[in-house]
Image (cartoon, rainbow, N blue to C red):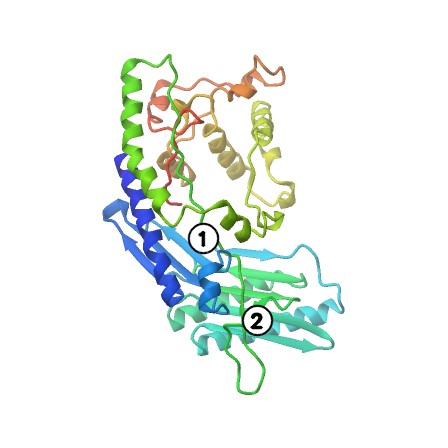
Amino acid sequence: MQERQIFVANFLATMDAVTPLIARLQYGAVINGTGNNTVYTFGECMKDLDQTDCNLCFASARLRYDDYNFFNETLSSQDETACADGDFSGGNKTVFSANAMELVRNLSVQAVRNDGFFVGSVNRSNVSVYGLAQCWELVNGSACETCLANAVSKIANCTPKEEGRVLNAGCYLRYSIQKFYNNSGAPSESGGSSHLAVILAVTSSTVAVVLFVTTAVFFMKKRIAEKRRQRKELGALLTTVNNSKLNFSYESLEKATNYFHLSNKLGQGGSGSVYKVWNLHGTGRLCEAVDPILDGNFQEEEASRLLQIGLLCVQASAEQRPAMSVVVKMLTNNHEIPQPTQPPPFLNPSNSSEISPHSRPVISSSQAESYTQSSGNSMTQSWIEPR
């Protein structure tokens, strides 16, 4: 627990330190802590923004933290490719795809020659495509070239979709039918055609450190004393969060999310999905909970394993829920994944006749002991850990 507190404190310190660096240089890299509690944080504004927009715009920045040095990373397992839902409908799809690929190839070459940043457009046969390529500031020339070449190969899978984006560890590549970039901070070529940058919503940094509320009256005196001690230790951490630059006002969040527009939605609460997964687990049909948009393109064994880990994290008893460190080991196949025990209160068989008795397998005492560091509902506490 003490190590987690140290990690969170180091994380907050790096976030506070990187903010003025980005405000001054439009990018910043900060390292804080020692050993396993070291936090690495990097942030960079998109290069089409002027300094004022860089300081004000939450969405137009690349922000990442981790527990290892990723600053010179080019590719990683967390790289993402995102394609628009709809195909190009403004003309010949074959021409559009050809224009898009010609554009991104040219951008990937020119960006390497122009300090890791270039934009442009292709207009052929009355079909226009706009695009941008950018490497992050700490990535060198050869790594930038490698990263963008990889991005070009990935983005080819998006055509003839109206838009495609690739976010690699060391670079970003995008094409679109819309002129999506900001004119204010972009350089222009001597021939008169402008090369501008894109406003990209990559990651929004919003961190919540949740304090536990109280303990139940039936806990033993020793447990109550332990909870009070933990609450006292967390007091200083809460003060740090409230005084840090991560404590945003409602008005700021409203502006940053375009008045909470659905396009900026990251997720939602509610217990409906958990209820469904518990039912499917009890009837041996856990893979039916996988998003149908995948159309069966996934490994059933892996999906079942991940969903089972999720069920372990929502068990009714907080003491039986695995700590995040244990979850990480489960995800990397370095820890046995036990069967979940009883469902949460709202899914208890006494309240619902639909829950199968098979959804309540018994957990051994040795398994329960491995979950001594637990995370719970409003009666327990949650900690931030690196991904």
Instruction: Please report the residue visible at 25 percent of the width from the left and 49 percent of the height from the top.
Output: 33
Of helix, strand and loop, which one carries label 1? loop
Figure quadrant of residue 86: bottom right
Asked if marks 1 and 2 touch (Cβ < 8 Å), the reply is no
Residue 343 picture location, percent across and down: 51, 21
Query: Residue most toward the left?
Result: 34
Please give the name of the residue rendered at 36% of the width and 66% of the height, measured from the top-left corner: 24
Examine the image and state in which quarter residue 387 appears: top left
Q: Residue at x 57, y 43 (%)?
A: 298
User: Which sits earlier in the primary sequence, circle 1 or circle 2?
Assistant: 1
Judge by depth and name the residue closer to the eye, 96 or 297: 96
- Please identify, in this view, whether the residue under mark 1 or under mark 2 is nearer the observer: 2
User: What residue is drawn where x is 35% and y is 57%?
Assistant: 18
Judging by the rendered image, the residue that carries numbered circle 1 is 77
In the figure, is residue 91 to the left or right of 195?
Answer: right
Assign a secondary structure to mark 2.
Answer: helix
Classify residue 302 as left or right of residue 209.
Answer: right
Of residues 121 and 168, which is closer to you in this image? 121
Residue type at tag 1: Ser
Count up the numbered dots: 2
Q: Which mark is residue 104?
A: 2
Label disc, if present, on residue 58 of the rendered structure: none
Tag 2: residue type?
Val
Q: Is residue 12 visible?
A: yes
